Image (cartoon, rainbow, N blue to C red):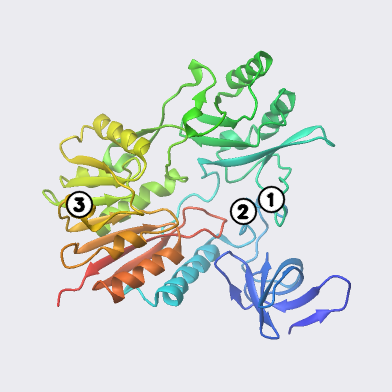
Amino acid sequence: MQEDIKSKKKLLLATIENIDQEGRGVTHIDGKAIFVEGALQGELVECESYVRKPSYEVAFTNRVIRQSNFRVKPKCDHFNRCGGCSMQHFEFQAQIAAKQRVFENTLSRIGKVKSETILTPLVGPSWHYRYKGRLRVKFVVKKNKVLVGFNEKRTHFIADISSCEVLPQSLSNILPSLQDLITKLSVKDKIPQIEFAADQNHLVLVLRILEKLDANDESLLNAFSSQYSVQFWTQSKGPDTVKPLSEKDNVKLSYALTEFGLQFSFMPYDFTQINPFMNQVLVRRAMDLLKPLKGEYIFDFFCGLGNFTLPIAKSGAKVTGIEGSLSLIERAKQCRDENHLNNFVEYQCINLFEITKDALLKLGHADKWLIDPPRDGAFQLVQLIDEEINPSVIVYVSCNPATLARDAQILVTEKGYKLDKAGIVNMFPHTSHVESIALFVKIIP
């Protein structure tokens, strides 16, 4: 049953057919796709359209008339207006199943490929998992108040929140106090964002400041730092201007891969996995698929700090980590040295979005590859595979199913691989984001 409700607003009655890759309900009216935020498969909802295009519309749910068995009460009081999460109304295991369907459908629709084996989804803690990220900041003159948080749903305004169920507990607990602190600063209207980075013992807040702090500002920040065990850093311009507010704030952040006996030190602005709990099981699965052996030579592309490089080296394999960021390469070398793996690991700084065949051949031949690209994927890299460059095994860690599917199509239809195993990693619970891992194996004629 689907029909227009007569009113000045465009209200619709819609039966939801399925869930899309952004966690929205999908229905069709007169051949046009309608994407309904906050609706679940099988529900009958009253929704209001707010984006209207010739081929589709986007709507939000006003009222649920017939409710899904998988609808639950969101844990967060701010869920209905804050855009930080999109799926708290969806029972947790049902979220996983929906993401799995999106993943498989994306491989099929974009890549025209299907995995021979679907791996069991990797899951972990569903709350207070986000140890790295960015919060927006805005001084609202009419309220004489600073807001710190994520965008509201469907607007560019910042949601007025007093806690967050996905941020580290140490940060969620102090949000109201942090807002009060920034309201007292002379530059309260010159701080557009705060980046945060945490480990098990520290919380670092990097303030993006457009004007210099005065002495009173620094005094207020130092007092807050002492009271709440927070370290403040500042950034006035580019990444090279990030620095601790004072020497006492110059802490060394770190995370461990306990199973492998590894410790990684990092700076607040370095790229690391947002969810340290899921990172542990992701690395374990990657090693299970790659099966590195003593004496093998392996490439780790987009290696970052060496999150996969060093566990590979722990097997006794020789591994070269390749990364486009020189600063990350320097930090990776530091982590390698601190973990006493100098004899097994070397690093090369190469822009992998522009890598040439000659540059790849200069690295030598590795029979096994691990690829962990950003959202753009590894198109240039997989295109270079030919008779000379032909690893027998590729483990591909992806944060974007669409680019994984694109690259999978190249590997399977043009380069002679089969998609042997693939599955999702629930790195971002209560959001529509899908992380995944796939194993490609060279077909021997």
Q: Are marks 1 and 2 in contact (CB under 8 Å)?
A: yes
**Residue type marked 1:** Cys
**SS class of the residue under badge 2?**
loop
- Residue 230 screen position, x and y as percent: 56, 25
Instruction: Tell me the mark number nearer the camera, choosing from 2 and 3.
Output: 3
Which residue is farthest left?
295
> Residue drawn 37% across and 35% down?
327
Reading the image, the residue beneath label 1 is 82
**SS class of the residue under badge 1?**
loop
Reading the image, the residue beneath label 2 is 85
Q: Quadrant of residue 71?
A: bottom right
Left or right: 408 in relation to 148: left
Decide: is 250 above or below 16: above
Tell me if I can see residue 291 in this picture: no
Reading the image, the residue beneath label 3 is 298
> Residue drawn 66% across and 32% down?
191
Tell me if I can see residue 178 in this picture: yes
**Residue type marked 2:** Cys
